[in-house]
Amino acid sequence: MSAPEIIDLSSDNEAESEDIQDVKPIILSAASKGTASYSSIIVPGNLLEDKAQSMKTFRGSYRPPCRQFWKSGEYELGHTLEPLPRNGKNRLRIHPKFLHSNATSHKWAFGAIAELLDNAIDEVHNGATFVIIDKFSNPRNGDPALLIKDDGGGMDPESLRRCMSFGFSDKQSGSTIGQYGNGFKTSTMRLGADVIVFSCCIKRSRLTQSVGLLSYTFLRQTGCDDIVVPVVDYEFSSATGSLVHLLRTDEKQFSTNLTAVLKWSPFATEAELLKQFDDIGHHGTKVIVFNLWQNDDGIMELDFDTDSEDIMITGGQKQVVIAKVNSEADLSQKCIATRYQYSLRVYSSILYLKTPENFKILLRGVEVMPHHIITDLMYIECIRYRPQVDTNQLVVDTTIGFIQGAPTINVQGFNVYHKNRLILPFWKVAHNSYGKGRGVVGVLEANFIKPTHDKQDFERSSIYQKLEMRLKEMTYEYWDLYCHLLGYQNKKFPHKTSIPQSPSTDSSRAVRQLKMNPSVGLAHGALDVVALGDPTLSSIALPQKRKRDIRSTVHESFNGDTFSDTTKDGPVNLKSKIKEEQLSIRKQTQMSDALKQENKRLSEQCSEYEDTEKQLLFKEQKLRSELKEAEETYNNLMAELRSMDGIKMERSVTVD
């Protein structure tokens, strides 16, 4: 599918004023469903005049009329929509109000930031080693803005235009988090009214730098009835050793786009604009979201001041304290289930089940350390769930336990990941008014169901509903078995012996040390795991389904006992099955390690070639400079020689 066509709106009238030229950048439009190519809209001349008048009215103003996100979509159109030209082409138009309505899928600001983090994580296969999240001061008015920068492969001019368009995505759904081609627009427009993107890329020995501006402020204040995105591109010229304008049509269109970018972005001159590439290097992307939204009280939604090493949700911490009684306030504030709601550092620490190797998330200059929720659990148990997806039978291991601080704090729910990314944090599947399930927390990775576009929920399919019911059963079953460890009385399963509440007590027969098999993928090292074969639990009548689930997750025998299971072919020794499974896992791990090493070697070799290429480019530039200096020296010497010959001729004439 071809990229959006770029049209120079200033080519029809060369005598228009500077005000009109300010609003004639490129237009990126959406395609109608089922078409194979994309076209753009040429704005009629009378509409350009209306935009010029709007520019004069709002000249010098860089803030949207309404700073509250949930109210910013309420505005009247300043003119009637112009009909499409009757050229036989059918396609959809996108009004600027769509930017706001599209962004309402993000009800939570941190969910929007997570989208931008996903884009950086997806760049790991292009060599990304870090993503920076920080505060940026707007040079025009000093207001804080949000900066997100990575050192991935960057975007060439065509890729940047696809990023700014709707529905375009080069990502493969099987290997990356993003796949819909809509996350950048929804996330940035949810955080602020405007965003500017800087991207540097080396592709086919060609170094390019591109700047794109998506401005809700510009679109509203100029009365646009289509989404207009000014983009300018630069290319490094080895002949001159400097950046030159990369023209898609002509210099006039470049100038028009640049004028719009400089007027509506935080940067007033081209030199300030290009200076933003200094800290990107030869490849990478920088996103600056400015004119950040405010809450209903007129206070900026993102709080940069409370913690110099964090970004907070304004008022989030205060609301949590008020909602709790004094006896629970301290424990609630320390619990990660509470802190992730208002602290970006805490949320980003649990956002990924496993952070890619050699990749760092730097928030306000300090690295975010990954946090595994299972380390906060007591009396851990692993339960295997087999969802039926089409004809395939998958296996999902769920780690479940009581969260530390239970039952004092009322926290429960499952943390459901999809392709390593947290989708539902502390999903409360058990709603029991009598407190059944209080403190029960679980962790699992569900790759068999699809997340919604904002990656804050899952599609409500039949598979999703079955998962919800099974997790609810897990919660109640676990509660019935182990709630007495926290001091609750369970009439359904009366216990004759009292068991201490602490899982580390030596006299506790209900807790045993089990080194989890790496195939579970959620536990690290030895954890306290409730053993099914414990004598104190022998009198409990477990459901047959739960017996099978628990036994299938036990990868080590206790006290040398041999577990057996029965299949349609007869009794099978579980030890032999476990050994075969471990051998298979070991082989897969070795193969995976070998592939990782080969990938690392090839990446290093590619980096060496790129460094060599850069050195040769600079060497070429240096040699050209030296050649130019030598030519100038040669010309000077020749001029001196000619002058010396003239003097000799004069002297010879005088002598004669």
Image (spheres, rainbow, N blue to C red):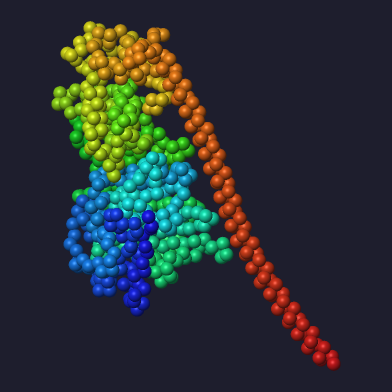
Q: Is residue 333 above or below residue 19?
A: above
- Please identify the quarter of the rendering in which residue 403 is found: top left
Q: Position of residue 372 (x, y in %)?
A: 37, 30
Q: Is residue 419 above or below residue 575?
A: below
Q: Position of residue 589 (x, y in %)?
A: 47, 28
Instruction: Residue at 34% x, 57% y: name it.
Output: 36
Left or right of 595: which side holds 386?
left
Report if residue 328 is visible in the image: no
Instruction: Residue at 28% x, 57% y: name it.
Output: 32
Q: Is residue 652 above or below residue 84?
A: below
Instruction: Residue at 24% x, 16% y: name it.
Output: 543
Left or right of 170: which side holds 631?
right
Give the total number of marks visible in the rendering: 0
Please state which of residues 558 and 544 is positioned toward the viewer in this rendering. 544
Q: Quadrant of the C terminus?
A: bottom right
Q: Position of residue 219 (x, y in %)?
A: 27, 62
